[in-house]
Amino acid sequence: MSALTFSGYRRPDGRVGARNHVLVVPTVICASVVAERIANAIGPTGAALPHLAGCGQLGPDRRLTHETLAAYCGHPNVGAVIVVALGCEQVIAQHLAEAARAAGKPAEIIAIQSEGGTVRTTARGVEIATSFASALDAESRVTCEASSLILCVKCGGSDYTSGLAANPALGRVADRLVDAGGTAVLGEIAEIMGAEHLLAARAASPEPAAQLLRIIKRVEGEAIALGLDIRGTQPSPGNIRGGLTTIEEKSLGATHKGGERTPLTDVVPYAGRITKRGLTVMDTPGLDVESVTGMWEAALKLSCSRPVSERRPGIPLPPSSRSPEMPKPPTPWRTISTTTSAGYSTAGRRWIAPRIG
């Protein structure tokens, strides 16, 4: 396994990227449309990061927005960054640009109010993006070791077969990657509840085990403090229709994605930097979009287990794959294959969707 390699981009900060995007980051929702227009103008090299935050936030909420956007600016799949500001928001554009430059990436800031409106800002942004894209196109991939890869795994639309087929298959992939020196990341704390003791028992040291148990207790305590029963969302109505009956049953299947023998080496906060080899648990919610937004920050490759549901948020930076349990892809799969790098069945016939990323 140690001889496995892939073609990637070595970054000045020591990390390795699987892609080489010009990332266009709006500081606030008001700048999201401009960011998307700029990214679209340069084709596949461009990637926008539209979001709904950046204004009217306080304390930990604002800090998390800053940290998440900054983490994306330093992402190894990014070769250059354009920060699109409005001019009156709370997120600091300079902070994001500095995060990119600290990772060795060129970065520019444009502000809608300073440029004189969205049209002028878009034109100026396209000019900068085109220059960045030309420079990135001249860069060549180099041979990189598989130990540089970070694999984030995510459930979606789980049913009674998830713990029997797709999730164990992803777990085997995680085990093999870690054997090669790589890293696997598991999130969705609400979908670990009831099986956390199994992950804690695999901890490489007492610290990550204790951290995981503290997070589980915190999430349970927050629900209780609000007078809520977390079983109202876990398992979801779709999970129940698929044959799951309790959160424990769902969690026992979901945790298979983290491997069968890979040691738990770290527990990190939402969008936290992944620094240790082995299995890392990230403190994310179970909601798909919120969860994978934090996990994408870390991923060079994102594998998604989506056995039945065809819902799938777009992925701006990491390549992705799916591992449904069905013996052949349903018709809706073909309609979304253009946003997916690869797909395969863990039961019955194998098939592969068109590779895009």
Image: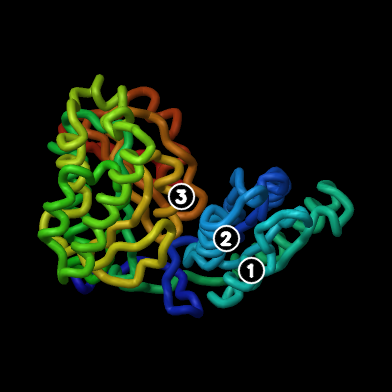
Disc 1: which residue: 95
- Residue at figure coordinates x 58%, y 71% from the top left: 99
Q: Where residue 44 sits in the image (x, y, percent)?
A: 58, 51
- Residue at figure coordinates x 70%, y 43% from the top left: 33
Quarter the N terminus occupies: bottom left
Mark 1 Cα shell of 10 Å, populated few (<14), some (14-19), many (≥20) = some
Q: What element carries label 2?
A: helix
Q: Where residue 268 sits in the image (x, y, percent)?
A: 34, 63
From this view, report whether residue 59 is shown above or below residue 195.
Answer: below
- Amino acid type assigned to the residue bearing label 2 in the image: His
**Mark 2 or mark 1: whose residue is earlier in sequence:** 2
Residue 297's image quarter? bottom left
Q: In this view, does 82 lie to the left or right of 7?
A: right
Q: Is residue 295 left or right of residue 250?
A: right
Disc 3: which residue: 293
Q: Is residue 158 left or right of residue 81?
A: left
Q: Marks 3 and 2, how far apart in space? A: 13 Å
Mark 3 Cα shell of 10 Å, populated few (<14), some (14-19), many (≥20) = some
Q: Which of marks 1 and 3 is in front?
A: 1
Disc 2: which residue: 66
From this view, report whether residue 313 is shown above or below residue 21.
Answer: above
